[in-house]
Amino acid sequence: MYLLYSAALAAALLLGLPYWLLHMLRRGKYREGLWERLGHVPARLANNRSRPTIWVHAVSVGEVLAVSGLVGQMRQRFGGHRIVVSTTTSSGQKIARKQFGDDVFYFPLDFAFAIRPYLRALSPDLIVLAETEFWPNFLRLAKKSGARIAVVNGRISDRSLSGYRRMRRWLAPILRNIDLFLAQTGTDGQRLQEIGAEAERIQVAGNLKFDTSPPDAPPIVASLRATLEQSGAGPVLVCGSTSEGEEPIVIQAFVNVLASHPRAVMILAPRHPERFGAVAQLLEKLGIRYWKRSLWSGEDVAGGVLLVDTIGELASLYGLADVTFIGGSLVPRGGHNILEAAQHGAAIIVGNHTENFRDMIQLFQSRDAVRITGPAEFPLVLMELLSNDSERHELGRHAVETLRSQMGATERTLEALAKLLPSGGRGDSPVNASTPTTPNK
């Protein structure tokens, strides 16, 4: 099975080689970290073997932010271990290096020649995978090396469930390499069983994202807040993580807002960096005044759009919002995490495509902490919230209360991971941070 998988993966990479090369030459994409992906262990990792290792893998920005609090607590609880973090995407790599320092690298391609050098250099006691990263060769070789393996913050989305079910016959032996699955919800735990995970290896620990602390605000937030206050600009609409097909909808809604609020401001953050240019062209085509965040130098943005063409600042920019829209949800992309907006007590709007965060959205909806709308109704819902201060403030207050009620996943995850370490992690230093609260029943 593994031989056939490796052959199929190699064939797919070869067939896609012209695409990868084109993007590397035109945009520099995929070039960064190429040697690390191919199995070249950076010296900063290979030359530091003074302590045993825990290897945490988080694919991209969302997963990195989700495990950031966990990694911080692991460094306290498991002080006798060195914690290293790998990512797959370049955007995730940038955030991880900012969060965790030099012990960050690119995850190797799922070939034995790329994986084995890392397992030899790091010799991890424990490998922690965020959400759902089921790489067959990696899991097989990691288990063979003697490492214990855990999946944390595990979830199976509606979109991926049917595909995993079809692959159950082949997936079940691969999942047996994983010692522990810590699922976000009971539904995710049940779905893990449906795709081949053994029930006795599954626990429900909650969603780590509820425990994530807001990042330190970058300087742009204070500068922009001062500019907004001095110029009397507002209200402020922050549209975050938007996908292709959503920007025309939210921009037209903003044009409608300007008719009643001529000094309104939209902060628009496309999900993928490669789309920054296309969104700028759209704004120009529609005749909308806009400023690129990377070039903004304190200008009055009233009546226009601030296009966020940077990485890692959106979570803090939600703190400026009167109303937020979380993208990937007016088009069938499954939605994105709403908790960064909820941390700031912002009124939150999402579209009706939120399958990737179904339980979270259902929870917030049940507590009147989010508004769900289709593309046609979006402008009306936006205008309603902007014209009704009490409703908008109540929505934001309920969002904060809902978030706080669900904290505690980090502590439960730490307790479970400790049992996978030699001697149950008792040789490591204890946690000295305050213990989060547990979810309401």
Image: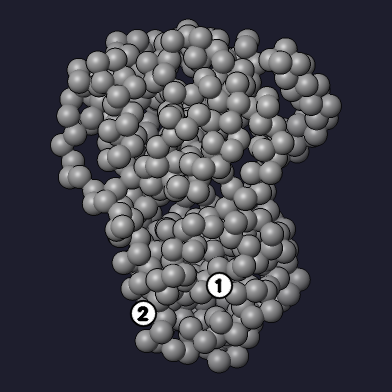
Image quarter (top left, top right, bottom left or bottom right) of the C terminus = bottom left
Q: Is residue 395 above or below residue 112?
A: below
Q: Quadrant of residue 268?
A: bottom right
Q: Is residue 19 visible?
A: yes
Instruction: Say what amino acid the circle numbered 1 marks.
Output: Ile
Q: Residue at x 76, y 71 (%)?
A: 285
Instruction: Say what amino acid the circle numbered 2 marks.
Output: Glu
Residue 14 appears left or right of 109: right
Q: Which residue is mark 1?
A: 372
Mark positioned earlier in the residue sequence (2 or 1): 1
Q: Residue at x 60, y 68 (%)?
A: 351
Q: Quadrant of residue 279?
A: bottom right
The kind of secondary structure element at disc 1 is strand
Q: CA distance from mark 2 to mark 1?
A: 16 Å
Label disc, if present, on residue 394 of the rendered structure: 2
Q: Is residue 346 above or below residue 47?
A: below
**Mark 2 crowdedness (10 Å alpha carbons): few <14, some 14-19, many ≥20:** some
Q: Is residue 300 above or below residue 212?
A: below
- Give the farthest residue toward the bottom: 260
